[in-house]
Structure formats: C-alpha cells, structure tokens
Image: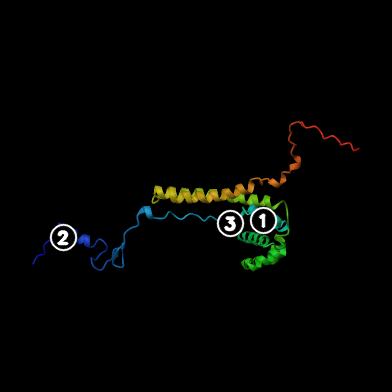
C-alpha cells in the first residue's frame, strides 16, 4: 500500500507540535518550567543594568594614600577637630584600613576617651583591623607623623571622593542610556534619579565642610552698642531745702 504524501495542513500541524524540540512529546520548550508556560518579563518591569559600586576604587593612588595617612596622624594629635568633621565618612577613603582607623577615631572622640596612638591601636585591635595583616608597629608609625590640620586633609579627601562619585555616576547614566532594554521611565525615574541622589548627598557634605562656621549671637555684646539719643531734659533740678 502506498503512503499518501503529507499535505500542507499536516506539515503545519507537525511543525507546530514540534516547534519546541525534535519530538512532539519528549521535547520540552525552553519557555516551559514544571509543565507550565513561563511568560517573558515585560521590559517596563525589568531592573536596569547593574551599576558600578559606589565605593572608592581598589587601585590606591599614592597621593590619596599619603593624604589619608596625614589625616589620621593629625587627627590623632588633635582629636578635638574630629567631632566637627561629621561631613567625612569612611566611604570617602580609598584604603579599607584607613577607613577603619577613621571609624576608631570618631568612636573614641564621641566616647570622650583620651585619644593617642595607643588607644587608637587598642580600638583597631578590638574591631579586628589587625586581622587583615597590619602590624601594630606599622600602625603606631602611621599615627605618629603630623603635618597641617585635620580639616585641611579631610577636605582634600572629601574633594577627591566628590570627583570620583561624579565620574562614576556619569558612567552609570551612560550605561543606562546605552542599554536597549531600558525604557524612558527607567532612565529618568529609576536610574538617573537614584544616581543624582547619591551625588546630591555627597555635595551636601562638601558644602558643610567648606562653608564658614556661623557666628554665634553670644559674641555680640551690648557694650559696643552706641547709646540712644533721647529728648532734652525739661524739668528743673530740685532745689536744696534750707533748714532754719
């Protein structure tokens, strides 16, 4: 008996049943999981592409490392300035060890504990900073040399952090715009707004660091104020009573 050639309808049904594999029954469609059809996620609900981390780069600049060491040394010698430098955070440092030592300094000053290289070393040991391979003698030498003021070196470190943050935020926004899966809503409301919020936060800290301190009202004394001019005296002076 001769077989009839497959018609166009039979071929269509055969191809439709085997579109997900070579065999219509044994193959499994890549969009199916557990016997259920898995719908693709709409582009509007997808998250943007991952962005670079917002911490300083791991490649340490020699100039930045020297500035951080000078800050730690001068802050140890003049701990009273650390309390007024809340605008500087450990995230602004390029070296993890220096960021940990800055946390030790801020913790000791807020506890009103006497600050010197020995107490800073004790706090660093309590926080586990010596487990990273740092030697106590090296930390004591790092905290010994002083030059300049803590505010000066702190502003230099913060300025470097502001420039680094602005550069990487620009790269993040550029990555969002080049991603074809990113919609206009994601670019404006999700990507750019979050990125610019990080830049606005560090810009506020920079303004706090560089703006002059407000003058207190207690400095204004009344002794320097000129006396107010009043009307001329019209009443006559009392005459002395003559006793008999």
- Mark nearest the camera among 1 and 2 is 1
Relative to residue 71, is residue 162 drawn left or right?
Answer: left
Per the image, label 1 sits on a secondary structure element best described as: helix
Where residue 114 sits, quadrant-wise, is bottom right
Where residue 5 sits, quadrant-wise, is bottom left
Disc 1/disc 2 C-alpha distance (Å): 83 Å
Relative to residue 30, is residue 103 drawn left or right?
Answer: right
Relative to residue 216, is residue 24 drawn left or right?
Answer: left
Tell me where residue 55 appears, x and y as whole percent.
55, 56
Q: Which mark is residue 10?
A: 2
The residue that mark 3 highlights is 91
Q: Give the farthest residue toward the left.
A: 1
Tell me where residue 170 appears, x and y as whole percent.
50, 48
Instruction: Using the image as rendered, state which of residue 221 and residue 105 is in the foreground.
Output: 221
Tags 1 and 2 touching, CB below 8 Å:
no
Where residue 237 sits, quadrant-wise, is top right
The residue that mark 1 highlights is 83
Q: Give the mark nearer the N terminus: 1 vs 2.
A: 2
Q: Which mark is residue 236?
A: none
* Residue depicted at x 39% and y 49%: 183
């Amino acid at each position: 008996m001769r077989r009839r050639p497959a018609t166009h309808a039979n071929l269509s049904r055969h191809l439709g049943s085997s579109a997900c594999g070579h065999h219509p029954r044994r193959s499994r469609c890549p969009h199916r999981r557990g016997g259920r059809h898995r719908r693709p996620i709409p582009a509007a609900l997808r998250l943007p592409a991952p962005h670079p981390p917002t911490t300083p780069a791991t490649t340490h600049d020699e100039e930045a490392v020297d500035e951080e060491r000078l800050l730690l040394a001068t802050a140890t010698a003049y701990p009273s300035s650390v309390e007024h430098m809340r605008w500087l955070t450990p995230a602004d440092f390029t070296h993890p060890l220096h960021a940990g030592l800055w946390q030790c300094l801020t913790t000791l000053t807020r506890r009103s504990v006497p600050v010197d290289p020995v107490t800073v070393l004790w706090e660093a040991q309590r926080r586990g900073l010596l487990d990273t391979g740092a030697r106590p003698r090296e930390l004591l030498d790092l905290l010994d040399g002083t030059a300049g003021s803590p505010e000066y070196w702190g502003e230099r470190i913060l300025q470097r952090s502001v420039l680094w943050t602005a550069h990487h935020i620009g790269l993040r926004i550029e990555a969002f715009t080049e991603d074809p899966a990113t919609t206009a809503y994601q670019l404006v409301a999700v990507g750019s707004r979050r990125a610019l919020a990080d830049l606005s936060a560090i810009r506020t800290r920079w303004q706090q660091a560089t703006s002059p301190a407000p003058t207190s009202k207690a400095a204004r004394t009344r002794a320097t104020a000129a006396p107010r001019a009043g009307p001329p005296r019209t009443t006559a002076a009392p005459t002395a009573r003559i006793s008999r």
